[in-house]
Amino acid sequence: MQPSKSNFPVLFGMDLVGAGGIWLPRLLTQNYTRLGISDKEMIALIHILSLKEGNNVDFGPNEVARHMEADTGEVAALLESLNSKGIIKIETGLNIVEGRKSISVSLGGLYERLFEIWGCNKALEFEKKKDSQNRPDESQAVANLYCSFEKEFGRPLSPIESTQIIEWFYDEGYPEKLILEALKRSVLRGVVNFKYIDSILRGWKKKNLKTMREIETHEEGFLKRRKNASKEKAPKKSVDKYKDIYIS
């Protein structure tokens, strides 16, 4: 097609489509700050996606810097930061054919993190849909639990973890305050994982403790009994000691 004033828009459209593009997930653009990705790191990530879309398997900071028109050292620092956050994985090897060092960038970590966010969002959508009918207060309680757990864990919850919270709250019937108390105790004891939190909740359920007041009363009684037991044991040891002396 010969270029002319009338067909310039058509030629532009053909070249635009023919040049190709990149698939940029909306889930990423809407949640990259939640993943701890800065604006500059996001730009570098977009260029990585662009290079991979173009079937460029072997590329590193130099190629990304050239596309960004940025300093190689700055881009290398951005890639290293993304690597340390588990968003990308930089692997080095040897290109035997060309006899040089090769660098490859994997995006597996990014997709795993996006999967976690997707699962969490789906769980929240499920809760909103479920509770919009008759339990708005409970829906807010579950949302509060998600936020509290993500804050203490320092990361988005996985789909399995989100489901566990739903099971605790709805299926097991644990009140919001008890779940938060179990989370608090796991943090204080330095054992921040769902299995340990579940063991705390099951322990309370086994003892039929359903409120914070009941838990506090039970623990106060336990400490009191242990204190009394230690007091009773001490004199007995003393008597036995002197008894042995007199016998000998």
Image: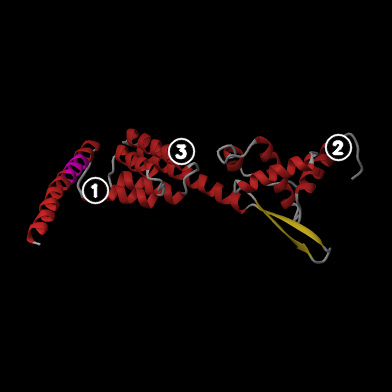
Image quarter for residue 243?
bottom left
Residue stretch rendered in magenta on the structure: 218-227
Disc 1 versus disc 3: distance between alpha carbons?
26 Å
**What's the magenta bit mostly, secondary-structure-wise?**
helix
- How crowded pointer 2 is (Cα within 10 Å; few <14, some 14-19, many 20+) is rated as few
Tag nearer the camera, 3 or 2: 3
Disc 2 marks a residue whose amino acid type is Phe
Disc 1 marks a residue whose amino acid type is Lys
Kind of element beneath mark 3: helix
Dot placed on the residue nearer the N-terminal end, 3 or 2:
2
Q: Nearer the viewer, residue 48 or 125?
A: 48
Residue at the image position 60 percent from the left and 42 percent from the top: 28
Please, is residue 68 above or below residue 88 in the view? above
Disc 2 versus disc 1: distance between alpha carbons?
74 Å
Residue at which label 1 appears: 205
Residue at which label 2 appears: 8
Residue at the image position 15 percent from the left and 48 percent from the top: 234
Dot placed on the residue nearer the N-terminal end, 2 or 1:
2
Is residue 95 in the magenta section?
Answer: no
Residue at the image position 76 percent from the left and 46 percent from the top: 64
Kind of element beneath mark 1: helix
